[in-house]
Structures are given as C-alpha cells and as structure tokens.
Amino acid sequence: MLNARTTLAAVVSAVALTVMSGCAVVRDQQTPGAYIDDAAITTAVKAKLVESKQVDAGAISVETLNGTVQLAGFAKSATEKAAAETLASGVKNVKSVRNSIVVRP
C-alpha cells in the first residue's frame, strides 16, 4: 500500500512539473515574462485589426515573438496589407513587424 502511494505521488509530481514548465515558456523565449508580454502584444494587435474598417481581421493571423509581430494571411489589396502593418506597428511594445500577408483579389 505504501509503495503504491509513493509511486502515485512520484507520477503526479512528474506530470505536474512537465505540464507547468511546458506552459510557462515557449521555445526561443527567455522568460515567462517575455511570453506574457508577447501574448499581450498579440491581443492588442488583434484588437486593433478587429476595430479597423480597413482590414478583414478574420483573414489575418497574428503571432508575436520577443516583440516582433508576424502578420500572415490574405488581403484584398495592397492598401489593406499596408494598413494591417501600420496598425500593428502602432501597438505599444512592438519592436518590429514582419508582414507576410499575401494580396489575393
């Protein structure tokens, strides 16, 4: 009985450590704080895109890594593509924007 409890406790501890460390930091990011900052930037950029009448926010994906925003997806015109980049670059704490949006009429 004691051996089963010890084994169960060890398994639960190992799973907890694995899950917690996996959620805290994504590859290539230094600290949990950087991950949280990037998540906040991504949320702010998405909000700007949704608020804008110049872009179709549903057709554009946003990811952030260490303050660099990656825009991907499709735009109906070069103007829409440029507007998305301008909106993203205007968000607080954005260091740079990589615009991989493809113009597709």
Image (cartoon, rainbow, N blue to C red):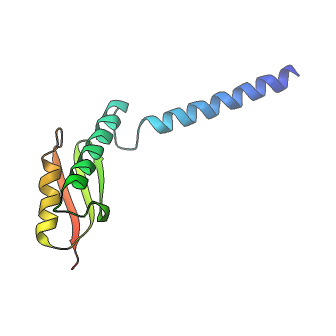
Residue 63's spot in the image, x, y percent? Answer: 31, 51
Residue at 52 percent across and 32 percent down: it is 20
Vertical arrangement, residue 20 with respect to residue 68, above or below: above
Residue 15's spot in the image, x, y percent? Answer: 63, 34
User: Residue 94 lies in what quarter of the image?
Assistant: top left
Residue at 15 percent across and 57 percent down: it is 85
Residue at 57 percent across and 30 percent down: it is 17
- Specify whether 49 is left or right of 7: left
Residue 84's spot in the image, x, y percent? Answer: 17, 59
Q: Residue furthest top?
A: 2
- Depth check, front residue: 89 or 25: 89
Q: Residue furthest right?
A: 1
Quadrant containing the C terminus is bottom left
Vertical arrangement, residue 69 with respect to residue 18, above or below: below
User: Residue 78 lies in what quarter of the image?
Assistant: bottom left
- Specify whether 56 is left or right of 22: left
Quadrant containing the N terminus is top right
Residue at 21 percent across and 50 percent down: it is 48
